[in-house]
Image (spheres, rainbow, N blue to C red):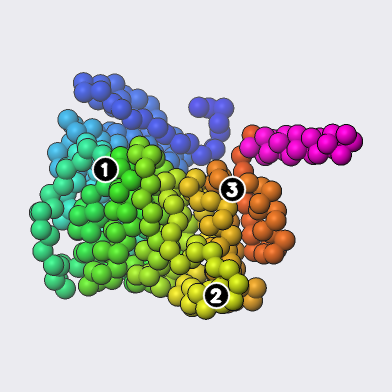
Amino acid sequence: MSRSHQQDLQLTCKNVAVGDEGYFKTFFNSLLPQSIRWTYLHIDKRLLQFIPSNLPLIRVHSLVLNHVQDSFQGGLCAIPPIFPNLRVFGGANAIPMFTTYPSSLTTCVLSWHGMRLRVIPLLTCLAHLVSVRTLTLCIGDDYPSDLPQDSPTPTHTLLCTMPNVVTVSVRFDGEFKWRIVKGIFSFLVLPKLDDATISFRKCTTADGLLDVLEVLRRLVRLSNRPFQNVHTLCVDVVECEDSSVREADILKLLLEPLPTVRDLTINIPTAEFAGSCVVQSDGDSATRPTEVTRNQFSSLETLRLINCHHLTERKLRALAKNLWNNTPSNGLQLLEVIECREISEVFLLELSSIMGDSLKWNFPSWRRRKESSDDDCITASSRTQKAS
């Protein structure tokens, strides 16, 4: 400790067993002389009581609190007014109730795993976080909630306004329950929301994919319209246990209710694109569908496809043809393809001869080596045939 001189100190002290509080009180007392150097605290909620209430931790910019179900009732967590310059708060099974809400707080990350999510106290908390710009909610696969089965339509007096939130991320670690998401967002007013991420970490059925997309449609229909001004949207489904794929017009499902989206990221391994955007038309018949499609999705400027392993080269070619327009500031300007298994680099090189810098891609190094090896084999084989 003495060798660090006046460098910043990051203190992590979590997973405190019941009965060990006395040991950690002694530990904290030994660190109090260095508290002026603390900048980051990741601690168990019970350890807050050992920090003197008259000790201003003016350099602490990040506070992360952990709770376990047995040691915490209801998820409410009183935060003493000793963090005047707090910028980031993270809570696991915790709803922060600040004695004095710091105006410097710009990022709030809240997660629940195996514990009841109390929605009304959560909304009460969020209503006070008027300076927060980035809000992240993570909900585990075994959570209950105090939302009624049929949530009432929120009245004007019940709405929670977060005037400065620009970025929202909602992540589910288990089976998707759109009612919880709708229940929370039906009370939120987010006038400056620009960037939204819906992340679904595990899907046991292919139909679950459509459930994720349906959530966005339901959110858009809410009277308080929390997603009305979203310009950047990411839909992320990392794991799907069902190998069957149900075709869906994914772009239409996402963009039709969200006409303001300019930057769209789709990370859905089971997605098989269908619909007008990926219909390959031949000859003169291509003109009219292409113009209709471009007009329908005219706001879309960037499309990013990640791990879309059921997207074929034929459909990607049609999608690019129907959306891309070689005119600056008109239609799709950038198409990114990242680690989509059915798309080869040879194909993308061919497509880039048409789209130029409007097409970008990225593959893992092992796949580039494999494709290079395959190309070498093909080249060597053709040379052998010519020689014979």
Q: Position of residue 296 (x, y in %)?
A: 45, 75
Q: Which residues are magenta?
A: 367-388
Q: Is residue 172 above or below residue 250?
A: above
Element on which disc 1 rests: loop
The residue tagged 2 is 285
Asked if the residue under mark 1 is in contact with the one under mark 2, i.e. CB atoms within 8 Å, the reply is no
- Residue placed at 45% from the left, 56% from the top? 273
**Left or right side of 146 for 185:** right
Label whose residue precedes the other's in the sequence (3 or 2): 2
Question: How far, Cα to Cα, is label 2 from label 1?
Answer: 43 Å
Q: How many marks?
A: 3
Q: Position of residue 299 (x, y in %)?
A: 48, 74
Label 2 amino acid?
A: Ser
**Left or right side of 176 for 57:** right
Magenta stretch: dominant SS? helix
Q: Nearer the viewer, residue 89 or 344?
A: 344
The residue tagged 3 is 343
